[in-house]
Amino acid sequence: MIRVMLVDDHPIVRAGLRAVLSAAPDLDVIAEAGTAAEAIKLASELSIDVVLMDLRLHGSEQNDADGVYATSTIRKLADPPQVLILTTYESDADIVRSVSAGAVGYLLKDAAPDVLIGAIRSAAAGETVLGPAVAARLLNRVTNSQTALTPRELEIVEHLDLGLTNREIARRLVISEATVKSHLVHIFDKLEVTNRSKVVATARQRGLIG
């Protein structure tokens, strides 16, 4: 049996997923969590094979304790389960952050039930699982590597989208203001823009941020 934990802050979504997975005789949902903290605690206490992880998790005391944070922390456990992201978001920033955190796969919530079940089986075997749209985005990043933003640059863009100043961004990312400015120079060059507002507008247009 493949032991699965569902992580989503919407109980109805978890109930729906549980119903879908119940059709597979080799899958056993042994735990559910609604926050990153709950997911990390259960993953450290139970013997789980695959965590089905949502990206946007609310109700946590930590503002940054989303699905990526939970994934990164869980993957650092002594005997960690595989983590398969299941979300409605498909921006480059979300995909890159998730993969960098250690997720073995990334699927969108519109995936068919048989695709989801197959993905969980593949994840349990340690195989990489990517939805078609996600695979296309990653391929595009590889083929356009000269102009693709790095994970850190994507983080900078996300913070620009929040309207933060260089000083505020530096404080959040624990880097110097000079480093933030250096990243901005590279971002301006790669996106072929000349100011911060155009960075955000172009990033949204290209699907780099949600």
Image (tube, rainbow, N blue to C red):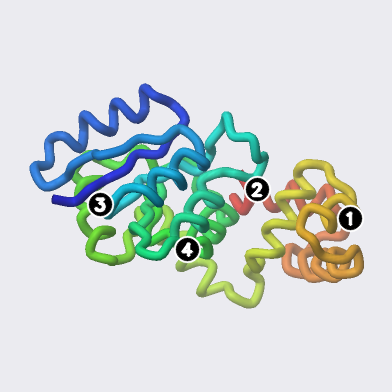
**One can see residue 136 in this view:** no
CA distance separating discs 3 and 4: 20 Å
Q: How many other residues sit within 10 Å of disc 2, few (<14), some (14-19) or many (≥20)?
A: few
Mark 4 vs 1, N-terminal side: 4
Q: How many other residues sit within 10 Å of disc 4, few (<14), some (14-19) or many (≥20)?
A: few
CA distance separating discs 2 and 1: 23 Å
Q: Amino acid at mark 3?
A: Ile
Q: Residue at x 34, y 30 (%)?
A: 14
Q: Residue at x 44, y 26 (%)?
A: 10
- Provide the residue designation for mark 1: 166
Mark 2 vs 4, N-terminal side: 4
Q: Which residue is at the far front? A: 45
Where is 11 relative to 171, above or below? above
Q: Amino acid at mark 1?
A: Asn
Q: Which residue is at the far top? A: 12
CA distance separating discs 4 and 1: 31 Å
Looking at the picture, how far across and down is residue 65, in whole percent? 59, 44
User: For the residue labelled by badge 2, is the local secondary structure a helix, a strand or a loop?
Assistant: helix
User: For the residue labelled by badge 3, is the local secondary structure a helix, a strand or a loop?
Assistant: helix
- Provide the residue designation for mark 4: 76
- The quarter of the image holding the C terminus is top right
Q: Amino acid at mark 4?
A: Lys
Looking at the picture, how far across and down is residue 138, in whole percent? 47, 64
Looking at the picture, how far across and down is residue 79, in whole percent? 35, 63
Q: Nearer the viewer, mark 2 or mark 1?
A: 1
CA distance separating discs 1 and 3: 41 Å
- Provide the residue designation for mark 3: 120
